[in-house]
Amino acid sequence: MLIAGFPAGAWGTNCYLVAPAAGEECVIIDPGHQAAQGVEDALAKHRLKPVAVLLTHGHIDHVASVVPVCGAHDVPAWIHPSDRYMMSDPEKALGRSIGMPLMGELTVGEPDDVRELTDGAALRLAGIDFSVAHAPGHTKGSVTFQVPESTDVPSVFFSGDLLFAGSIGRTDLPGGDMDEMVASLARVCLPLDDSTVVLPGHNDHTTIGRERAANPYLRQVAAGQGAGDPAPRRGM
């Protein structure tokens, strides 16, 4: 499997292109702020043809380039229905009033083809199986995507802003909820194998085993103590 990732835009949001190999079809995950050119560069470098965009949640730092990317390649975007409104109304998602400046160069709106994700959905896109888990806490419609383990390749977990290396996503924006975050960490993350590679929405990759041992939030959740607030949380 080929995974090409890069941090994009003002928030350094990780955008990923996932394909069976170079020269094949691919899926684009979270094309955020100023990600369109990086996507085109990665497509050209690896000779990839996109077939879909997958969105872990609706915050503008993860969806800002959805319209140009989907439009350029005539592909659908998949998002959980609880976060769909954010594509057209990013200010509301951030607790801001309509009309307040928000990085004025952004193209706000939906692509022509929007499809809705559900908990437990199994998607086969570009020859790759993605399992979807609804994981509210950062937003009401946050989801994760997992690619199963295959021969000599560990499972890969695209965690969005649920789980980071050493931290978790913030819960203080509209739609955020710490109790839901704790429940999602327990239900979605803790059952995963230690070898599972975590590719988060921000910062460096990690593994479930590393986070189970060292992430203060996940350690507290595993111990049944909630998540508390032992370390700075990340994400927009």
Image (cartoon, rainbow, N blue to C red):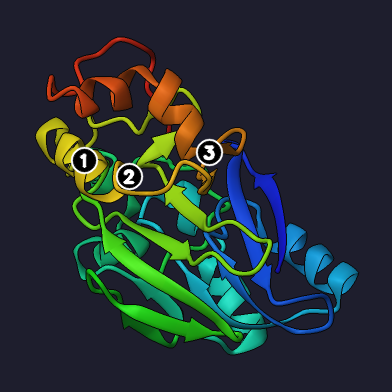
- Give the left or right position of residue 77, taking residue 115 as reference: right
Q: How many labels does the image show?
A: 3
Q: Nearer the viewer, residue 33 or 77?
A: 77
| Residue visible at 85% across and 71% down in the picture | 46
* Other-residue count near label 1 (Cα within 10 Å), few / some / many at <14 / 14–19 / ≥20: some
Task: Identify the amino acid type marked 2.
Answer: Cys
Secondary structure of residue under mark 3: strand
Residues at marks 3 and 1, CA–CA distance in whole angstroms? 16 Å
Task: Identify the amino acid type marked 1.
Answer: Ala
- Give the left or right position of residue 226, taking residue 9 as reference: left
Residues at marks 1 and 2, CA–CA distance in whole angstroms? 6 Å
Residue 56 location in percent, x, y? 40, 58
Q: Nearer the viewer, residue 83 or 224?
A: 224
> Pointer 3: what residue?
207
> Pointer 1: what residue?
186
Task: Identify the amino acid type marked 3.
Answer: Thr
Residue 234 seen: no
Q: Which residue lies furthest to the right in this view?
A: 45
